[in-house]
Amino acid sequence: MKARSLLVLFAAFAALAPASVDNSSEALRGRLLPDLPEHLEFAQKDMLHGQVQDALAHIGLILMDHATYHINFDTVPPEKQAECTAAFRDAIAMWDRALGNGFELDEVPADQPAEINVTFQPEVKQAGSEVAGYVTWSRKVVGGTDGTPIHMDFTADVRVRTIQPDGEQMLLEHMRHTSAHELGHVLGLDDSPFYGDIMGPLDLQHPVSDFESAELENLRAVRTQAEEVKEQALAMKP
Ligand SMILES: [Zn+2]
């Protein structure tokens, strides 16, 4: 059997050893990052106390319904850049199809501030290991005590590699899987141990271009609840 080239996609704080996972562990598919249900709980509590602005800030962190991103290149040759941009935009479109109306990420020029900073670069390493990409993020609600209005504060730093560890180019399909995977973390999904999942590791021979529907169940459920809280909050807003 030919050895497969695999690149593990890393989350900010979670690294998985896919080979050690029992494939019957279906519960490992579509897991949420713990902070997502926490923000829903905060929002629901805020609503009980009539703190509408707080609730909306927590909901905004779940829904990502008006976030911005920009794409940067670090020593990526100009002739490769259009492919990188297409891969990332395709990944956004995948999420758009999967989540529908409540999801809205807008691209802004690279010299303008954006919540999500995307950088394509020849190689990406995490903790000394070659990875296809990674994302670090911060999701919090700020303001209220210092005179500024309460608002959501979200930032993410996404890295996507353009050259495979053996020197071959990363293809659009590889960068699209990687981009969609990192956006999955931005939206609150944890890693999956399963090859074939967007949130699973990247198999260079079989990059994934669509979601297993089971991957989206928990995320869709928490987003539906968040939409309900948002509706209540907007109805109460003076
Ligand atoms: Zn990951």
Image (cartoon, helix red, strand yellow):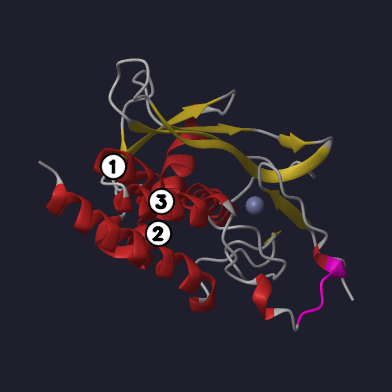
Q: Is residue 225 above or below residue 124?
A: below
Residue 134 image offset from top left, x and y in percent: 64, 42
Residue at position x 67%, y 40% from top? 163
Tally of numbered discs: 3
Q: Label 2, secondary structure: give it.
A: helix
Residue 222 image offset from top left, x and y in percent: 42, 64
**Image side of residue 148 versus residue 8, left or right:** left
Residue picked out by circle 3: 62
Q: Main secondary structure of the magenta part?
A: loop
Residue picked out by circle 2: 95
Answer with mark 2 or mark 1, whichever residue precedes in sequence. Answer: 1
Inspect this view and state whether residue 164 appears: no
Location of residue 206 by image quarter: bottom right
Q: Residue furthest right?
A: 1
Give the amino acid at mark 2.
Answer: Trp
CA distance for labels 3 and 1: 17 Å
Disc 3 packing (10 Å; few <14; some 14–19; many ≥20)? many
Give the amino acid at mark 3.
Answer: Ile
Residue at position x 60%, y 61% from top? 199
Camera-near label (3 vs 1) is: 1
Residue picked out by circle 1: 51
Are the residues at dot 3 and dot 1 in contact (C-beta closer than 8 Å)?
no
Give the amino acid at mark 1.
Answer: Gln
